[in-house]
Image (cartoon, helix red, strand yellow):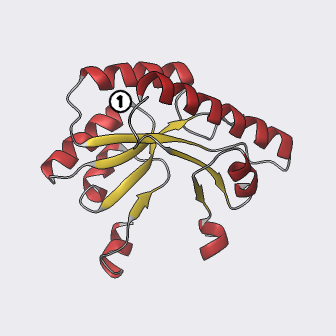
């Protein structure tokens, strides 16, 4: 991503999607607009620390584990509540939690995918009501990729990740 940032025009709004290690945060914070994959308070703290150094506020989405695959990352609903309780008690002036992100199981079973997206939408609604009732910026529900984005939109997604459809497979 850093290499692409150097090569491309500077008016691009960059979204980091994928698992992010804390030791890599310092490389993307100077230019990234949103991080879709915050899966721990440790990572959120590191983003806040690096954003402060760069005099920036970084929009973040909390990654929720909704899939029935061990290879996916994310927080359970209980862990999200725990993270948000810690977030409210700490000095996180350089990050803004703007919503949730989740990845459904990679399967041809559309009913399972729909169920997982519906579950994420329910969690989003509960978290919005409990922690962000009057914050208009908590509005993003990032779910759906090239193979399942139509179901995700039907279930309430506000952001889809369709890089494979645009750029082809890696």
The image quarter in which residue 105 lies: top right
Q: Nearer the viewer, residue 101 or 155?
A: 155
With 131 as the anchor, is 124 left or right in this view?
A: right
Residue at 34% x, 58% y: name it: 33
Across and down, in percent, residue 32 comes to 33, 59
Residue at 39% x, 66% y: name it: 1
Q: Nearer the viewer, residue 49 or 119?
A: 119
Q: Nearer the viewer, residue 65 or 169?
A: 65
- The residue labelled by disc 1 is 41
Report how many numbered discs are placed on residues in the image: 1
Q: Nearer the viewer, residue 44 or 81?
A: 81
Q: Is residue 10 above or below residue 102?
A: below
Residue at 27% x, 55% y: name it: 29
| Residue lying farthest to the front in this orientation | 134
With 102 as the anchor, is 27 left or right in this view?
A: left
Q: Residues within 10 Å of mark 1 (few under 14, many from 20)?
A: some
Q: Is residue 66 above or below residue 157?
A: above
Residue at 74% x, 54% y: name it: 148
Across and down, in percent, residue 54 comes to 16, 54
Across and down, in percent, residue 118 comes to 71, 36
Image quadrant for the C terminus?
A: bottom right
Across and down, in percent, residue 31 comes to 28, 63
What is the secondary structure assignment of the residue under circle 1?
helix
Q: Is residue 66 above or below residue 47?
A: above
């Amino acid at each position: 991503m850093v290499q692409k940032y150097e090569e491309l025009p500077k008016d691009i709004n960059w979204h980091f999607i994928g698992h992010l290690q804390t030791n890599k945060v310092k490389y993307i914070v100077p230019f990234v607009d949103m991080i879709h994959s915050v899966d721990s308070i440790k990572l959120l703290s590191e983003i806040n620390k690096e954003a402060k150094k760069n005099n920036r506020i970084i929009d973040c989405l909390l990654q929720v584990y909704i899939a029935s695959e061990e290879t996916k990352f994310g927080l359970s609903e209980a862990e999200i509540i725990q993270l948000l309780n810690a977030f409210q008690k700490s000095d996180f002036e350089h990050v803004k939690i703007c919503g949730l992100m989740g990845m459904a199981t990679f399967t041809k079973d559309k009913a399972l995918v729909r169920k997982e997206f519906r579950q994420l939408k329910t969690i989003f609604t509960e978290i919005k009501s409990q922690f962000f009732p009057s914050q208009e910026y908590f509005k993003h529900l990032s779910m759906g990729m090239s193979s399942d984005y139509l179901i995700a939109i039907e279930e309430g997604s506000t952001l889809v990740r369709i890089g494979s459809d645009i750029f082809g497979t890696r």
